[in-house]
Image: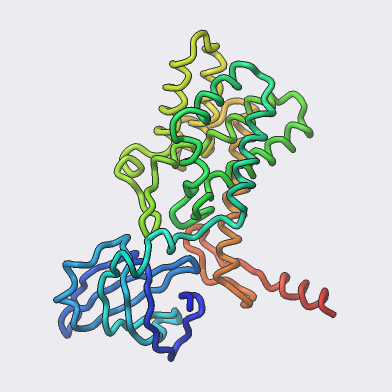
Amino acid sequence: MSIREWEPGQRVEAFVALRKLERREYTGGERLALEFGDQSGRIEAVMWEGFDTVLDELTIGGVVKVRGIVGSYRDRTQLRVEKIRPATADEASPADFLPHSPVDPDELSRGLAACLGSLSNPDLRRLMDLMFTTGDLRERYLTAPAGKLWHHNTVGGLAEHSLNVVRLCEFACQMYPDLDRDLLVCGAILHDLGKVDQYEAKAMFDYTDAGRLIGHINTGDQRVASAIEALPDFPAELAMVLRHLIVSHQGELAKGSPVVPMMPEAFVLNFADELDSKMGALRHVGEKTGDAPWSEFVNLIGRYVYFGHRQDHVQKAET
């Protein structure tokens, strides 16, 4: 039974990913505040006693076996843990707890190949061939997440998100034919490239040291700049404008971009990235909301989200 299926009153015993672990004081002593996860979602948990003997064995990002009773606290489902221990290697694999993109991996691979094969600019094609046909970057790109929690936070999420951005950019090119289609497609494929270095996968996605200290925009730009340096006679202006798309794609200094968009293609990439990121995040919110008309308050966007119209649409279709 997955975490999403747990309901108050149930007694559960399961293998789960340990996402958070904190020892906290309260008036009666100390308690353990935890968060568990699996492919279906997350749940907060508390353990009031009996954790001293196992605390040193528990590792965030590892798999544990827990036993407890599902309850609720402040209108949120919570597990009261009675017993917890690390899982052994033959009991559970950390990879089994990672969510996967709904898009088939082979479809993602074919989509990337089609984008690369569609390029007519010979210099951009040389660059993309170098980056995605040598080393392990292609495999890492196809399996990396695009986020830790907010959007496309799945195995394959980076490729799913980036290919969606490519499609949006290609639609914009049909609407506005003055745009440089090949430049924009390459920018869409590469804009989040640094996320192959930003996250590591255990039984959950978490930031690497480089991901926190340097950030995905900088590491992605470094990867592209290094590849360009390895290509003889790559046009300097083309290198400059491609890198501009990468470093400006989040649109604002406050959102982490070192520069703001200053080219038509950079504006389009920023808007396409923002649109798909939001829709991916709202899909995640909608899945958590289930059949309820309103979501819980979503801190990252500072509002509730209404899904009731979808239920009305389904009911009308069924009748």
Give the residue at x 78% y 78%: 315
Give the residue at x 36% y 53%: 206
Return the x and y of residue 276 as percentages of the image width and height: 61, 48
Return the x and y of residue 296 as percentages of the image width and height: 53, 72
As drawn, the residue found furthest toward the front would be 90
Q: Quadrant of residue 50?
A: bottom left
In the figure, is residue 178 to the left or right of 284? right
| In front of the other: 89 or 34 | 89
As drawn, the residue found furthest toward the right would be 319
Return the x and y of residue 220 as percentages of the image width and height: 44, 33
Q: Is residue 276 above or below residue 8?
A: above
In the figure, is residue 294 to the left or right of 258? right
Count the marks: how many?
0
In the figure, is residue 95 to the left or right of 53? right
Colouring of the image: rainbow
Q: Is residue 57 above or below residue 246?
A: below
In the figure, is residue 116 to the left or right of 197? right
Q: Quadrant of residue 235?
A: top right
Give the residue at x 81% y 78%: 318
Return the x and y of residue 113 as percentages of the image width and height: 63, 35
Q: Quadrant of the C terminus?
A: bottom right
| In front of the other: 275 or 45 | 45
As drawn, the residue found furthest toward the bottom would be 9
